[in-house]
Each structure stands twice: as structure tokens, then as C-alpha cells.
């Protein structure tokens, strides 16, 4: 066993994010057969990812604020603290802070067979996609 010291917070790159988004890695693989990565991700109001997908899917646990997640079918799901959203492997989606609030979530994913292809980044989310009305909530509120 060993205690792991915190790594420096990094600001996510503008090629993959719009607005201010910061990442703190909590856990990352140490051994060749390990795949799990866990990180805390903080979004400023209105900040968002670009469209992307994950080779092995992703779990996102909202810890503060209000999150919005969008899909290619035009759906927008609103998720609140304590709720977890699962995105299946290969499904295009985006994450964002709801208007007017900061949002934080834990991101949990496994690396793909080729770790460099674990996440496939695509085009930026349009303002129109971000402005779509919420079509569902995680708790069905």
C-alpha cells in the first residue's frame, strides 16, 4: 500500500473544451493490466466539452452544481449532485455546467485496448446544441 500525493490541477485544452474546465486526477493505472482512471472535473458556468466518445464507456458522478449531458439524438439530460450518469462505449456525448452555476463531477473510465484511443474527441458543441431544452433528468423529476 502507498499514499498517493495530489497531482497539480490542470486546465483542460481549448481543442477539447469551451470555457474554463479544470481536472484533478485521483487515480490512474500503475500496472500494465490496470485500466481505471478517476478524476474530479470542474466546469465554470456554461463551460462544456467537445463532442466525444469513450472506447469502454464512462461513469460521471455529479458532486456539486447542475450538469447537462447531450447526445447526438438531441437529448439533453440534467443531472444533480449525488446522481450518476453512465454513457455506453462509443456513444457520442458532451458534458456541460448548466447556465449560471459551476459544476463538478467525478469522471470514471477504463482505458481502451489502445490507451491513446480511450477517448475520441470530435467537433465542438454548437451554441444551438448547448441551448437545447432539457429532455430528461437522471431522477425523472
Image: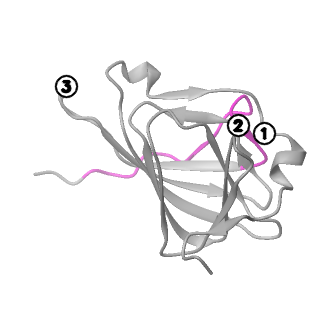
Q: Is residue 11 above or below residue 102?
A: above
Q: Earlier in the sequence, mark 3 or mark 2?
A: 3
How far apart marks 1 and 2 lie (CA) works out to 5 Å
Residue drawn at the location 72% of the way across and 28% of the way down? 15
Where disc 3 sits, the SS reads loop
Please tell me which residue lies in front, 80 or 27: 80
Per the image, is 15 magenta? Answer: yes
Measured as percent of width and height from the top left, residue 136 is found at: 66, 67
**Between marks 1 and 3 in the image, the one whose residue lies nearer the viewer:** 1
* Label 2 packing within 10 angstroms: few (<14), some (14-19), many (20+): many
Tell me, for residue 71, which label it has, or none. none
Residue at image x 74%, y 59%? 44
Q: Residue at x 49, y 71 (%)?
A: 83
Q: Tag 1: Cα neighbours inside 10 Å, few (<14), some, or many (≥20)?
A: many
Q: Quadrant of residue 91?
A: top right
Furthest toward the left, the residue is 1
Any magenta on residue 74?
no
For the record, the magenta segment spans 4-20
Q: Quadrant of the C terminus?
A: bottom right
Where is residue 62 shown, x and y percent of the image? 53, 66
For residue 125, the mark is 1
Secondary structure beneath label 1: loop
Report the residue marked by disc 2: 50
Position in image of residue 96 (x %, y %) = 70, 54
As drawn, is 92 to the left or to the right of 112?
Answer: right
> Are dots 1 and 2 in contact, CB under 8 Å?
yes
Q: Main secondary structure of the magenta part?
A: loop
Name which quarter of the figure residue 115 lies in.
top left
Amino acid at each position: 500500500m502507498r499514499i498517493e500525493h495530489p497531482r497539480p490541477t490542470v486546465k483542460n485544452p481549448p481543442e477539447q473544451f469551451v470555457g474554463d474546465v479544470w481536472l484533478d486526477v485521483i487515480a490512474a493505472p500503475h500496472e500494465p493490466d490496470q485500466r481505471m482512471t478517476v478524476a474530479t472535473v470542474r466546469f465554470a458556468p456554461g463551460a462544456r466539452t467537445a463532442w466525444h466518445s469513450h472506447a469502454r464507456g464512462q461513469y460521471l458522478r455529479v458532486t456539486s452544481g447542475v450538469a447537462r449531458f447531450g447526445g447526438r439524438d438531441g437529448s439533453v439530460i440534467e443531472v444533480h449532485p449525488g446522481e450518476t450518469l453512465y454513457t455506453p462505449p462509443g456513444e457520442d456525448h458532451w458534458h456541460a455546467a448548466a447556465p449560471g452555476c459551476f459544476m463538478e463531477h467525478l469522471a470514471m473510465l477504463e482505458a481502451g485496448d489502445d490507451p491513446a484511443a480511450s477517448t475520441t474527441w470530435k467537433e465542438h458543441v454548437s451554441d444551438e446544441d448547448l441551448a437545447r431544452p432539457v429532455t430528461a433528468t437522471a431522477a425523472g423529476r
